[in-house]
């Protein structure tokens, strides 16, 4: 075989080996996104839009709106639920529970609510640290659910990325979302007296109406 031919073959082999090495060094952490048609690093770690159960039109007809005056969020909830509100500078907490407003002489309404839905909005004039906010929420909820089975995942809600925390133990079942938008930490919390699918769906329906 002529020396020129051997040289060309060796050169081709070297180029192929170099191409393979380059692929493993620079492109192995990228995957192709079928949704965007773009290469995304660690695509499996990109938060996915939370899929929630939506309220029916009939249910929405019997719900009412809550709109925050101090912050930009709003949410819908059943009209007959109890609302508890508190706020101070840079903080707003509004909670709705599945017990109707107390009625004098109705001792049967003093039992624990089946569902408690809470929104906490915390403004930070400095740069809020999202990861610290998530860790603080884990610790806070862990005090209420000390032996809970915990699950954690990244989610999107109305296009805003956040962290979803789930606590499941003998004391009840809680789902906790933490989001950061424009310098404000939002915590959307659902606490259920028991892990009942009907209660979970009700919580999801309320969350689905939330607007930042």
Image (tube, helix red, strand yellow):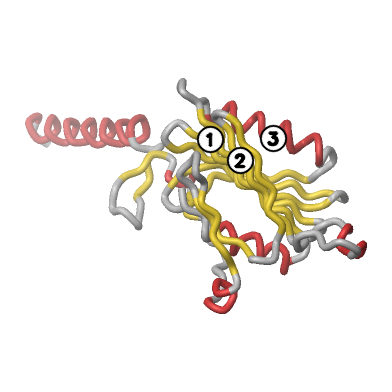
Q: Which mark is residue 15?
A: none
Is disc 1 placed on a helix, strand or loop? strand
* Residue under pointer 1: 185
Residue 101 vertical position relative to residue 163 in the rendered view, above or below: below
Using the numbered discs, state the Cα–Cα distance from disc 3 to disc 2 in whole angstroms. 15 Å
Label 3: which residue?
A: 138
Residue plotted at (53% across, 35% down) = 185
Residue for point 69% across, 66% down = 80
Percent x, y of residue 85: 66, 45
Residue at the image point whose x is 88% and y is 58% from the top:
110
Q: How far is the residue under mark 3 from the one under mark 1?
A: 14 Å
163 or 185, nearer to the observer: 185
Determine whether the residue tagged by mark 2 lies in a helix, strand or loop. strand
Q: Are marks 1 and 2 in contact (CB under 8 Å)?
A: yes
Q: Is residue 60 above or below residue 125?
A: below
Quick one: quadrant of the N terminus? top left
Mark 3 or 1: in front is 1
Q: Return the residue found at the far bottom.
A: 58
């Amino acid at each position: 075989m002529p020396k020129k031919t051997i040289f060309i073959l060796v050169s081709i082999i070297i180029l192929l080996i170099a191409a393979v090495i380059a692929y493993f060094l620079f492109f192995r952490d990228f995957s192709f996104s079928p949704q965007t048609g773009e290469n995304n690093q660690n695509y499996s770690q990109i938060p996915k839009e939370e899929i929630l159960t939506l309220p029916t039109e009939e249910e929405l007809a019997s719900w009412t709106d809550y709109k925050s005056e101090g912050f930009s969020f709003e949410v819908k909830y059943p009209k007959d639920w109890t609302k508890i509100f508190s706020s101070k500078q840079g903080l707003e907490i509004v909670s709705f529970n599945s017990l109707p407003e107390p009625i004098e002489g109705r001792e049967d309404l003093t039992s624990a609510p089946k569902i408690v839905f809470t929104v906490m909005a915390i403004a930070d004039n400095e740069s809020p640290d999202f990861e610290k906010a998530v860790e603080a929420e884990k610790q806070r909820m862990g005090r209420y659910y000390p032996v809970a089975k915990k699950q954690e995942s990244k989610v999107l809600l109305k296009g805003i990325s956040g962290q979803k925390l789930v606590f499941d133990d003998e004391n009840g079942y809680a789902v906790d979302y933490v989001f950061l938008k424009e310098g404000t930490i939002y915590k959307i919390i659902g606490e259920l007296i028991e892990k009942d699918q009907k209660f979970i769906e009700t919580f999801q329906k309320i969350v689905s109406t939330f607007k930042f």
